[in-house]
């Protein structure tokens, strides 16, 4: 069974060999290029047709009022929305006055290829115009991973069956007309009409620039383009207007005489710099560009280094091999040059969720970057630290101490107008703390820990201590919060939240003990750290002795069951067809919640508890969230359901390539893409790292995968792990000897002396069932 035949299976590229207008918006997301600073959707060079035009600068947003039918204290007054900035991708083409538009005439061939090693999007088109003139157009596009402010396109036109006059119009366009969105889907964006107001424009020779400012947020944006044109005798013209700049190239072409154009585009923005300052910034970026060949070489070198660190090899399932490399490429693009800015849930591939960042970044994306591109992880955490003043203000407004970080944001302020899912989801504080602890544990970056890390841990610990309380029996309770599962809200003692808060409190106490001078700077004394330790020690973790499972939150097991048998398959996701109050009072979970706790805080559960909990929650989890499948894959593998782990891995990996949630048009699911690595390394590789001790592995492969290999970096040590059906091989290529644990048995890996260990068979267990119609697609059936 093939759900989406538009992409061929190839280990190092994503290739579409035909054109389908109905899939255009999806392919624009899949073929998006970004470096974490600039994002270009994979729109056609000529701009039309398009599913959803998109050019983004990380951190550029517009303010909008949040609508309330009935306002309340503590509700955020305004939101932030990512905007489509100046489009520098556009290269329009006319053949004998006929616009090149593949909806008309005859399209002979159309191929797009995203090359994951070269970091470019290439396109080749063979087309005959309505007037009968046949041409070939090829283009190669890149967003530089090395020069963060620069993107470029190489564009070639060739006539195939006779002479023709060719006009190429290279444009910068601001305030593009956007298509309508689905107002009933909260995952979609809220587009703004004409968010940019012109401040200046100019042009000369083959150069043009546009400078704009957002109306509400007052962010100044500059975009400039320059060109190199080669071919037969050409004429050039340039003009600029408030929202349009155009360089026009005219040539009379004959067969065998192609026209070659290279377009260089530079971007810049600032909330503080003057108009001349931003103009100079953009001009400087373009001046420093190393030419087309230089950009290509730099891009390839950058990615060669990345794949040497981060490649995951999969044998036996070609789709998963392609998908994990696609996933890692887009995770890298989302964070590589996001220096000082957030990593949004959609990266810079589309406007979904209004461009907001959530807890997805710290819990799903940063674990991957920490082990493969730690500098990018550090930058993301420094961005969180930069937003600390807003989080402190938000906590004070809510009557709490410490920092209440936003559920969704771009610039640091809370943007969620639905407080049960937003404000009450305090677990984001512990998710940030978890990412801090992991980063320091993996890198040993004590300077980061002393500066950024300590303050984030202290202010999040203060939040938990003021949010919770000790009850009459001494248990520390955290009541009235929303955990990861968004089909439950305002619950007491959510197990995930309590366990992650426990870790947060303990880590804050330990870290301030290591840095007493920083503790004094933050007014932390022995009494406060003792209170944190008391709260951590007394943290209440509900458990139902009668049913032998952990309730997702206190009282959850007493809720009325959801009638899955009576729920039509077309009524998923449930949030679009049923009121939240009905979801909140039933035993149905949108995503892995308690199961996620068993992954991130696996040290708090026994092996048997994990198995029973997993079986119980499998029966009520509908996976209406893209964050769920990868975590279910991890725990399925741990408790011995290897076939099921493989199925969930496939769902996480193919979330966007197969458009499984029918909203890839709005941008890729970056956390689910990161979850592909998590499901492979943490699931089938069984990797855990709960403390500063040894890396723990429990690798096992399902029948459909014959080999898995990946690399991990830990404090200067480089460990290569290779898993086959019968054994695991650990090879240390750099660093001092490394202690590991393999299926419960301690071992030591020495550089140059690979260690090969057998893999024991899993304990046989009955396969759990899922809600009616919500089982994942079996990998073995899909590959038939």
Image (cartoon, rainbow, N blue to C red):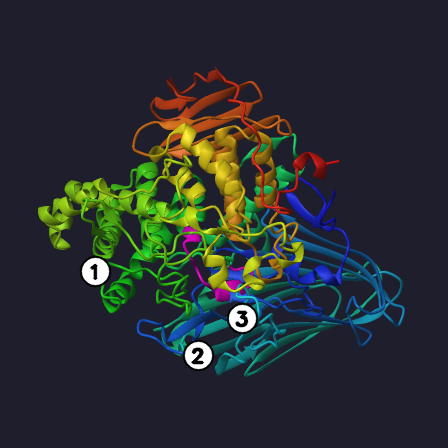
Q: Is residue 77 magenta?
A: no
Residue 239 appears left or right of 428: right
Give whichever of discs 2 and 3 has the lower sequence position: 2
Label 2 and label 3: CA atoms lie apart by: 29 Å
400 and 369: which is toward the camera = 400
Which badge, 2 or 1, comes first in the chain's sequence?
Answer: 2
Residue 84 - label: 3
> How far apart, in angstroms, are the residues tagged by discs 2 and 1?
30 Å
Q: Nearer the viewer, residue 690 or 623?
A: 623
The answer to whether the residues at label 2 and label 3 have Cβ atoms under 8 Å apart is no
Q: Quadrant of the C terminus?
A: top right
In the displayed structure, 690 sits above or below 30; it is above
Span colored in magenta: 348-361
Residue 165 lies, in percent from the top left, at: 81, 72
Q: Is residue 62 visible?
A: yes
**SS for tag 1?**
loop
Judge the density around disc 3: few (<14), some (14-19), many (≥20) Cα neighbours within 10 Å.
many
Occupied quadrant, residue 766: top right
Residue 374 image position (x, y, % from top left): 39, 43
Q: Earlier in the sequence, mark 1 or mark 3?
A: 3
User: Looking at the image, do the residues carrying marks 1 and 3 touch, with CB atoms under 8 Å apart?
Assistant: no
Q: Which residue is mark 2?
A: 69
Residue that label 1 marks:
401
Task: Say which element carries label 2.
Answer: loop
159 displayed left or right of 519: right
Measured Cα–Cα span from mark 1 to mark 3: 37 Å
516 up-or-down from 87: above or below: above
Tell whether position 359 is magenta.
Answer: yes
Closer to us: mark 2 or mark 1? 2
User: Is label 1 or label 3 in front?
Assistant: 1
């Amino acid at each position: 069974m093939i759900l989406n035949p538009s992409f061929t299976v190839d280990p190092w590229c994503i290739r579409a060999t035909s054109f389908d207008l109905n899939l255009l918006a999806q392919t624009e997301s899949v073929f998006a290029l970004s470096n974490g600073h600039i994002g270009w959707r994979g729109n056609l060079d000529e701009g039309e047709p398009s599913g959803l035009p998109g050019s983004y600068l990380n951190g550029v947003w517009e303010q909008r009022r949040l609508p309330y039918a009935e306002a309340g204290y503590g509700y955020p007054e305004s939101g932030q929305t990512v905007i489509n900035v100046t489009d520098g991708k556009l290269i329009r083409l006319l053949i004998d006055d006929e616009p090149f538009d593949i909806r008309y005439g005859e399209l002979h061939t159309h191929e797009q290829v995203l090359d994951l090693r070269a970091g470019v999007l290439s396109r080749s088109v063979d087309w005959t115009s309505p007037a009968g003139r046949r041409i070939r157009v090829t283009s190669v596009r890149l967003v530089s991973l090395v020069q963060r402010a620069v993107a470029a396109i190489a564009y070639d036109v060739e006539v195939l069956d006779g002479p023709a006059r060719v006009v190429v119009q290279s444009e910068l366009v601001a305030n593009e007309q956007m298509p309508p969105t689905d107002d009933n889907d909260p995952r979609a964006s809220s587009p703004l009409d004409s968010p940019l107001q012109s401040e200046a424009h100019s042009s000369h020779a083959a150069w043009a620039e546009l400078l704009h400012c957002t109306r509400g947020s007052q962010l100044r944006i500059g975009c400039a383009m320059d060109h190199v044109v080669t071919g037969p005798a050409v004429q050039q013209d340039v003009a600029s207007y408030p929202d349009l700049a155009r360089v026009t190239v005219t040539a009379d072409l004959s067969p065998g005489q192609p026209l070659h154009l290279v377009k260089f585009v530079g971007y810049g923005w600032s909330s503080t710099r003057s108009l001349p300052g931003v103009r100079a910034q953009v001009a400087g970026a373009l001046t420093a560009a190393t030419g087309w060949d230089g950009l290509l070489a730099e891009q390839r070198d950058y990615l060669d280094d990345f794949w040497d660190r981060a490649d995951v090899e999969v044998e036996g399932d070609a789709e998963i091999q392609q998908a994990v490399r696609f996933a890692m490429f887009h995770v890298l693009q989302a964070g590589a040059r996001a220096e000082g800015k957030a990593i949004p849930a959609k990266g810079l591939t589309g406007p979904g969720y209004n461009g907001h960042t959530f807890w997805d970044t710290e819990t799903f994306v940063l674990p991957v970057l920490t082990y493969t591109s730690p500098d990018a992880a550090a930058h993301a955490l420094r961005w969180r630290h930069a937003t600390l003043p807003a989080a402190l203000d938000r906590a004070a407004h809510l009557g709490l101490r410490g920092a209440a970080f936003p559920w969704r944001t771009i610039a640091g302020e809370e943007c969620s107008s639905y407080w049960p899912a937003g404000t009450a989801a305090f677990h984001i504080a512990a998710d940030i703390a978890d990412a801090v602890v992991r980063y320091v544990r993996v890198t040993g970056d004590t300077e980061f820990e002393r500066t950024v890390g300590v303050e984030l841990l202290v202010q999040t610990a203060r939040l938990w201590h003021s949010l919770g309380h000790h009850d009459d029996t001494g248990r520390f309770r955290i009541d009235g919060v929303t955990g990861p599962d968004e089909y439950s809200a305002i619950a007491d003692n959510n197990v995930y939240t309590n366990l992650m808060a426990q870790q947060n409190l303990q880590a804050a106490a330990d870290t301030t003990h290591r840095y007493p001078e920083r503790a004094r700077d933050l007014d932390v004394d022995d009494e406060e750290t003792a209170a944190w330790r008391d709260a951590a020690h007394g943290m209440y973790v509900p458990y139902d002795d009668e049913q032998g499972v952990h309730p997702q939150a206190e009282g959850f097991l007493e809720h009325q069951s959801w009638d899955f048998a009576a729920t039509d398959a077309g009524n998923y996701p449930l949030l679009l067809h049923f009121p939240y109050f009905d979801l909140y009072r039933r035993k149905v979970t949108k995503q892995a919640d308690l199961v996620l706790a068993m992954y991130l805080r696996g040290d708090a559960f026994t092996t048997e508890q994990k198995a029973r909990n997993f079986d119980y929650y499998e029966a009520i989890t509908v996976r209406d969230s893209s964050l769920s499948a990868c975590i279910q894959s991890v725990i399925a593998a741990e408790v011995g359901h290897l076939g099921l782990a493989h199925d969930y891995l496939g769902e996480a990996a193919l979330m966007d390539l197969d458009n499984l949630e029918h909203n890839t048009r709005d941008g890729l699911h970056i956390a689910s893409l990161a979850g592909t690595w998590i499901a492979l390394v943490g699931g089938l590789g069984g990797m855990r790292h709960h403390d500063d001790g040894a890396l723990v592995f429990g690798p096992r492969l399902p029948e459909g995968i014959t080999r898995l290999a990946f690399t991990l970096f830990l404090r200067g040590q480089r460990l290569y792990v290779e898993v086959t059906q019968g054994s695991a091989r650990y090879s240390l290529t750099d660093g001092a000897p490394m202690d590991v644990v393999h299926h419960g048995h301690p071992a030591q890996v020495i550089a140059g002396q690979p260690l090969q260990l057998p893999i024991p068979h899993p304990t046989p267990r009955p396969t759990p069932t899922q809600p009616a119609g919500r089982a994942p697609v079996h990998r073995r059936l899909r590959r038939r």
